[in-house]
Image (spheres, coloured by chain):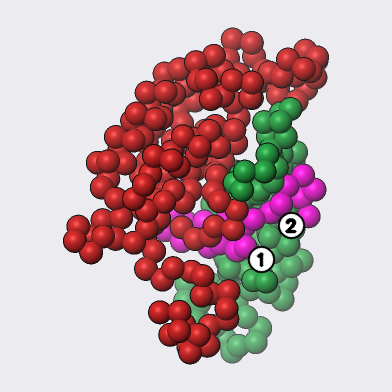
Chain colours: A red, B green
Amino acid sequence: MEGANVSCGYPPRIKRIEKHMVYLTRKLEFSASHLYHNPALSAEENKRIFGKCNNPHGHGHNYTLEVTVAGEPDPVTGMVLDLKELKEILEREITQRMDHRFLNYEVAELKGQIPTCENIARVIWNLLEPKINKGHLHKVRLYETADLYAECYRNGAHGA
Amino acid sequence: MNDGLKIGLGRRYRFSASHRLHSSRMSEEENRRIYGKCNNPYGHGHNYVLEVNVSGTVDPATGMIANLADLDSFVEREVIEPFDHKSLNEDVAAFRENVPTTENICKVIYQRLKHFPKARLERVRVEETGNNTFEYAGEEL
């Protein structure tokens, strides 16, 4: 196939794009509380940087997570991976760990980190990547509200 | 943290504005044929949704790529304030000679936001209505 690309006159950069890659995205929701506080900073600094998110008793969100897996559909099943399987991985790794939890105190992977959308997205990536063995994890996007999300992907990955 | 992962942040904003699609490079008839209802001489409006996507290093002290208050005030100053409740054709200099299609709105917004000092602008996405969405990520290298 690479030979065909070259003879079509594509610049070399394009050759790397896998032509039959399909991206599938599964959504899930979970609800959790958190607060932003860095013990290395003064109370006043914390207030200034984190504002309302620094409320000592925390606050909560309904998070929406979008998990995108990239791969080539299996010629027999037509699937990149079985959605049921993905659902089970998400249930085990994310929902059971984070749903109806206080992220600062109950999620070990976030210990010592401020549970911002950015940091939670990276933790979710690190939890899911080794579990997805058919296709590969392409992107996780975590919405904290409908107007704010963070996403995590491999440097240089594009598309979908 | 150098783990080969990239972290992006997306934030949605809203503005309402009017526009008229009309190109001085075409005849009246051509304009009507190409732009249809959007060529109505008195213009019409939309509730636009702007999604700004930035990337950068997460500061371990704050857990953030960029403080949202900084991003919000930058977008407010560069886009919302000059565009919201305005006629794009009449009130925004960039659209005097440049038809305010959503494609061009994306490009103009990208130019205005690419200098955000706290993170790297990855792309902008503008929804003209719930059914029409446009994205611009700068020129291909």
Task: Check contact, mark 2 vs mark 1: CB within 8 A.
Answer: yes
The residue shown at (69%, 46%) is: B56
Tell me residue B8's x, y (percent). Answer: 61, 46
Q: Decide which of B97, A92 is in the foreground and name it.
A: A92
- Mark 2 residue element: loop
What's the magenta region?
B114-138
Dots 2 and 1 on the same chain: yes
Q: Decide which of B124, A97 is in the foreground and name it.
A: A97
Q: Which residue is mark 1?
A: B138
Q: Earlier in the sequence, mark 2 or mark 1?
A: 2
Q: The residue under label 2 is which amino acid type?
A: Lys
Tag shown at residue B76? none
The residue shown at (38%, 44%) is: A132
Tell me residue A104's x, y (percent). Answer: 56, 18
Q: Which residue is mark 2?
A: B114
Q: Chain of mark 2?
A: B
Q: Please tell me whether the stretch drawn in magenta is mainly helix, strand or loop.
A: strand
